[in-house]
Image: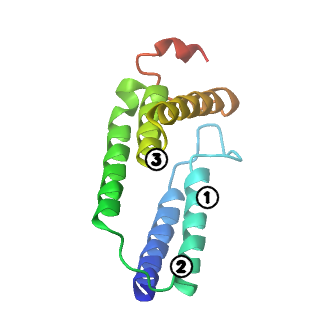
Amino acid sequence: MKLNDRVFGIAMLVLAVAYGAAATRFPEPFGGSEMVGPDTFPLILAVVLAGCSLYLISRPDPDNPWPSARTGMELVLAVIVLIAYTALLVPLGFIIATALAVGTLSWRMGAPAWRAYLTGLIAGVVVFFLFTLALDLPLPTGPLGVLEEF
């Protein structure tokens, strides 16, 4: 697995550099440059990914057996949930889509269903109001259009 970790680390480092380079090509916002512009978050992600990649290249994990087929199916299910989340984000709105995605992933990780979906609902509401009120970044409201006033 050491070789696999190093190869994956190199691939992720290439991705981080390409992602960071693409982020620097965003146009400057109307009205001049700002401290936090459209390239800020992608650049932060690129730096974090590059750092993690360098760590993975320099200190790979010891050899471990491959995960079981059940674990592989859980990973495939997680990817399907995240793809469905992106597809449902606009029609259902951020709060409902987040509640469903976080709830499903939490439930699959072993939480009782009612706690998992309650956690998803709370996370969706908190993040929605954090982005809408504190950061002034609009998120899709879907059928909860009454929240557009915030």
**Where residue 93 sits: x, y (%)?**
43, 26
The residues tagged by marks 1 and 3 sit, at their Cα atoms, a distance apart of 32 Å
The residues tagged by marks 2 and 1 sit, at their Cα atoms, a distance apart of 18 Å
Disc 1 target residue: 44
Number of marks: 3
Comparing labels 1 and 3, the label whose residue is closer to the camera? 3
Q: Would residue 58 appear left or right of 5 to someone viewing this image? A: right
Residue at 71% x, 47% y: name it: 35
Q: Is residue 46 above or below residue 148?
A: below
How many other residues sit within 10 Å of disc 3, few (<14), some (14-19) or many (≥20)? Answer: few
Mark 2 and mark 1 residues within 8 Å of each other at the beta carbon: no
Disc 2 target residue: 56
Residue at 35% x, 25% y: name it: 91
Of the residues shown, which amino acid type is indicated by label 2? Leu
The residues tagged by marks 2 and 3 sit, at their Cα atoms, a distance apart of 29 Å
Q: Between 42 and 9, which is closer to the camera in this rendering?
A: 9
User: Please, what secondary structure does the residue beneath circle 1 have?
Assistant: helix
**Where residue 4 sits: x, y (%)?**
40, 83
Comparing labels 2 and 1, the label whose residue is closer to the camera? 2
Disc 3 target residue: 110
Residue at 31% x, 47% y: name it: 80
**Where residue 118 sits: x, y (%)?**
53, 29
Residue 142 - label = none
